[in-house]
Amino acid sequence: MNHPKGPILDGSMVDSRIKDEGAGKEQSVLSDIVSFFTSVRTTIVILCCLAIASILGTIIPQNINLEDLRRTASPFYFRIVVILDLHNLYRSWWFIVLLLLLTSNLLGCLLQRLPKIPKEWRGAADKGSVSFHRSDSRPIHEVKGMLTESVSKLMNKNPTVVEGGEATELVWVKHRIFLLGFPLIHIAIIVILVGGLIGLLYGFKGNIQLREGEVGNRFVLYPSGAIATLPFDIAVDSFTLTRYETGQPKEYRSDVVILKDGKEELKGPIRVNQPMTFEGISLYQANYQVVGVKHVRLSVKGVDGAEEEINIRPGESIPLPGGELQIKLASLDPGTTSRGAGVEIDVERAGKQDRVVKVFRNDSDPAKVEDAKIRFLGYEPLYATGLQIGYDPGTVFVWSGCGLLIAGFVIILFTNLSAVSIRLTQGDGRTKIRVHGRSRRDRAQFREQVEATIRESLGKSSSGA
Amino acid sequence: MTSIELITYVTFSYLICAVVYLLACISTEQESGFRSGALGLLIIIWCVHTFAIGLRWVESYQMGIGRAPLSNLYESLVFFSWCIGLGLILVRMKFRTDIVVLIGLPVAFIALASTSLLDPTIKPLIPALQSNWLVAHVVTCFLGYAGFAVSFVAACLYLVSRGFNSLEPYLPNQRLLDEIVYKSILAGFPMLTIGIITGAAWADYAWGSYWSWDPKETWSLITWMVYSMFLHARLARNWKGRRTAALSVVGFGAVLFTYFGVNYLPGLHSYF
């Protein structure tokens, strides 16, 4: 795109200002507004403001509790933070105004420059890379034939011929699509910004915590912290955490079922990097918590020497071999001492507490309860999974915009608009030749090529005008 | 030989190559055999560097982990210096300026040498990084960074050439330097754009939000805005020379902060 150097001032507008001061003032205000929205200088200033604002946002803590700030900060600073929404800068009114200004500026620049494209598409060049005149003693049709042949070879295509009265015009245009590159990039940015705005207005984000086995649909909205309800229920069957041998986490996985009015609609795992989407609402694995114990695995050896492995759940009573005593879980130690994870077990006789024993994984000797020997084998934690909830109708726009953006860059980087137009006229018994050419890249090389082609094609019988 | 040892040799080879380049630039004229030899040396070192990265990839498969070597600070620095090496070779081929290579080589060396402070062992990927977007995101971002690094070197040389008249005869022609400042950004900018887009796509896929104003995201956007200001100033307002060179320096400052500075702020990218 050929951007003009300064703010655009229509010549006629300047004239009218001289003639009529009153009307001129109004028009100049109008033209100031127009030039504000169509000037690249404005774009640069807005980008600069956005950059500075974004830097501020990474320095000032975001999404903090305002009450804490009121207590710790000076009243003046607190007022500024509240008025300018500095704790929520990227969603503040003035940041959105800046984004809207950028959008309208881009739109203004586009609208101003788009009308020029059809003309350039047809081959008109307002800014040439090469321009010269020659004249030739041979008749016009002969010159036309020679030039058509040689320039077509250079441009690798045939010309469009325009015969208008006395003049004949030959036009070669290559890689016209280049002209669409810059508008495409700017349209893309507008589409992305619009998508962002739609997401901001109509989308939501939140978090839901569900225990294994729990069904729920109420979640916490981000960033407001308000409670909202999903249009469906999420039932968490299980949460699994697998680790590498080094102990680093390998996979977080929630197996869930989506229920609508009690009917199963969708079932499957949710992993990090593998979300689940239902009715446009996506669920992502965000975090997890250990909230309890599912069961504890113990090995019990009776007097007869037979070893039995039992799973005991919290609240459950299990009889020991012999049948007189029963055991019940009292508490779990997830492994805070060198003895490893372990449990405290209440031993009951006829429903009354008899004694308390402790068994740990790393104990060399089993705990003895009368004739029974109890070993601790392990436990299965009860998890609560934290799922992030996201709904954003703007993403379609954002991704289309990104696609257009990449297409625009590809066009600009891999195509090169070049054009040659030759105008032949008859005058003073000679054929007059006017050559215009332009190229978006490697201009010097292109100029040399065009000049050499014309020179060689016409030979010595022509002369520079 | 393991890839880690190989990288250590490559690191010092870059330093040696810089010395060879210095000697070549001092002792001989443009287009001499010595200078071409220095370029040949650089290309060989860069090929070994490429091989070392490939070897690390293979090693990770042999260890049963199997992942692209692009997922911690050690690996990203190795890859960053690889990109700088590539950028320098391309600039040397296109613009025939040895000085830009001479100044750029120590940058590649320092980036590589700083990996000796980091843990180089191959570790399995944490769940957040287990994604096919990883390679596309990291590669495009770093190719962009490399373009900006080359532009930065040329911009510094340009500013030195303008600021100290006595040095001007020893430096490349100012118009050429200005051209390199611009062309490298022209190459880097689409790469950074695609890097940001792939990052956003990945974030949307993994965390359900294509943009969360995480410090790294924000700083990459700031970098993007600085370079888009550069391009608009240059293309639409005909800024040239000192002012665009200054913008290139500011832009590279933003790149460095995006890469290193942000690590001191909490966020999704804290493992980089």
Image (tube, coloured by chain):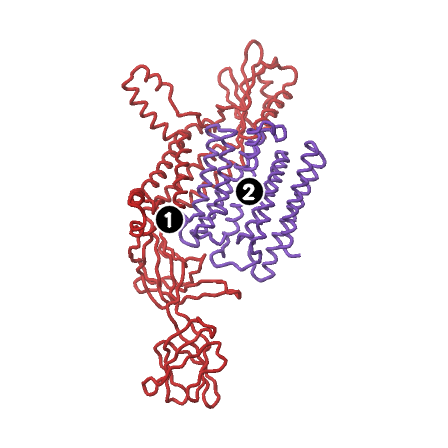
Chain colours: A red, B purple
- Which residue is at 55% across, 40% downward? B149
* Horizontal arrangement in the rendering, residue A82 relative to residue B211 (left or right): left
The tally of labels here is 2
Q: Is residue B88 left or right of residue A325?
A: right
Q: Position of residue A332 (x, y in %)?
A: 39, 74
Q: Position of residue B258 (x, y in %)?
A: 48, 45
Against A233, residue A421 (above or below) is above
Name the disc covering residue A61, or none.
1
Q: Which element is circle 2 on?
A: helix
Image marks 2 and 1: residues in contact by CB distance under 8 Å: no
- Specify the farthest residue to the left: A22
Task: State the image quarter where residue B166 is shown.
Answer: top right
Q: Amino acid at mark 2?
A: Ala
Q: Which residue does the numbered mark 2 point to in the structure image?
A: B146
What is the C-alpha distance between the residues marked 2 and 1?
A: 31 Å
In the picture as drawn, the residue positioned furthest to the top comes out as A428
**Residue flagged by tag 1: what amino acid is it?**
Pro
* Image mark 1: chain: A
